Image: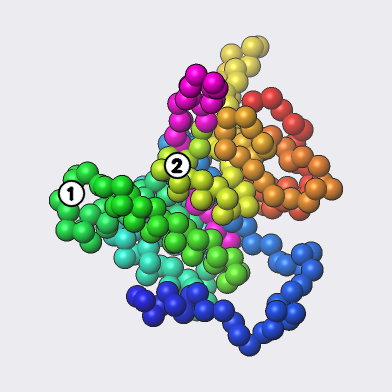
Amino acid sequence: MIKRVSKLLTRDKSLSIEDRIKPVGEIEPFLTMLCYGQAGRGKTVFACSFPKPLLLLDIREEGQDSVSDVEGVDLLAVERWQDIEDAYWMLESGKTKYKSVVIDQLTSMQALAIAETRERLGMKPGETLSQRSWGNVSGMMMTWIEHFRNLKKNKLHVCFNAHERTRDAEETDDERIAPSVGSNLTPSIASFVNGAVAVIGNSFIRERTDKKTKTREVRFCMRIGPHAYYAAKVRRPLSAGPAPDVVVNPTFDKIMAIIKGEQLVKKVRT
């Protein structure tokens, strides 16, 4: 494994610094995204709207039923940590048919990292991790999240799914920190993945009842605009102005249009 990692980190010395510099506008955009939310909020369906052929790494999620009728999606049931590394090296080789990869989901990937750390250290299942062991878990997660994110250099779109977690408010004598909602990961890993991707979307369901017909309408939505409590962002040209707060029935095409500066929907209160 050491040889493989050194291969990944070796720079291409065939090009000079000057040859590697190019105008920002000429860089082909490949989407890197974090989609998080509670179960049943449409995360897997959204992720499988990415360009096909698509590889779905199902990490103990078993959410394939919702996308079983989507053509061009292949599934790898991840059962151990080594499956994650092997899938990466397969994609990094550039010899596959895939245009997109989805990791579904990071919360379970973190659980695998914890189990792998315990096994490497000869610990018993469920044994409490030391602070140093947690550092090992964070290091594993950050390393491989970054590796998968960097597959955009291999012309792959990358989507990370994660479950949602609300962090309670903290209060001290001098200040009060409001609660925040983001991915269900340790704070250091959550902060890392938030900075690593170009778009963060929070999947949720909006319900409305027609007063006349008394019928209930359910809409799958995604927050992407800046929010006081929810982790959300989208990188797009400053000249395009602020991004929409919410996208209804989100898809890959809608997110890419927003990144390019289009305004698909009016800003709404959430």
In the rendered image, residue 238 lying in the magenta stretch gets the answer: no
Which of the labelled discs sits on residue 125, or is there none?
1
Tell me which corner region of the image, top left, top right, bottom left or bottom right, holds residue 120: bottom left
Which type of secondary structure does the marked residue at label 1 adopt?
A: loop
Q: Quadrant of the N terminus?
A: bottom left
User: Which residues are drawn in magenta?
Assistant: 157-180
Above or below 118: residue 147: below
Query: Contact (CB < 8 A) between labels 1 and 2?
Result: no
The percent position of residue 60, horizontal first and vertical second, equals 33, 50
The answer to whether residue 67 shows anywhere in this view is yes
In this view of the protein, which residue sits in the foreground, 16 or 154? 16
Kind of residue indicated by mark 2: Pro
Q: Hey, which residue is sitting farthest top in the picture?
A: 212
Circle 2 crowding by C-alpha within 10 Å: few under 14, some 14–19, many from 20: few
Q: Residue at x 52, y 79 (%)?
A: 10
Tell me which corner region of the image, top left, top right, bottom left or bottom right, holds residue 157: bottom right
Circle 1 crowding by C-alpha within 10 Å: few under 14, some 14–19, many from 20: few
Quickly name the residue at label 2: 187
In this view of the protein, which residue sits in the foreground, 94 or 142? 142
Above or below 199: residue 21: below
Kind of residue indicated by mark 1: Pro
The answer to whether residue 218 shows anywhere in this view is no
Which type of secondary structure does the marked residue at label 2 adopt?
A: helix
Q: Residue at x 49, y 65 (%)?
A: 147
Q: Quadrant of the C terminus?
A: top right
The percent position of residue 193, horizontal first and vertical second, equals 51, 50
Q: Main secondary structure of the magenta part?
A: strand
Q: Hey, which residue is sitting farthest bottom in the picture?
A: 14
Above or below 171: residue 25: below
Which of the labelled discs sits on residue 259, or is there none?
none
Q: 39 left or right of 72?
A: left
Tell me which corner region of the image, top left, top right, bottom left or bottom right, holds residue 140: bottom left
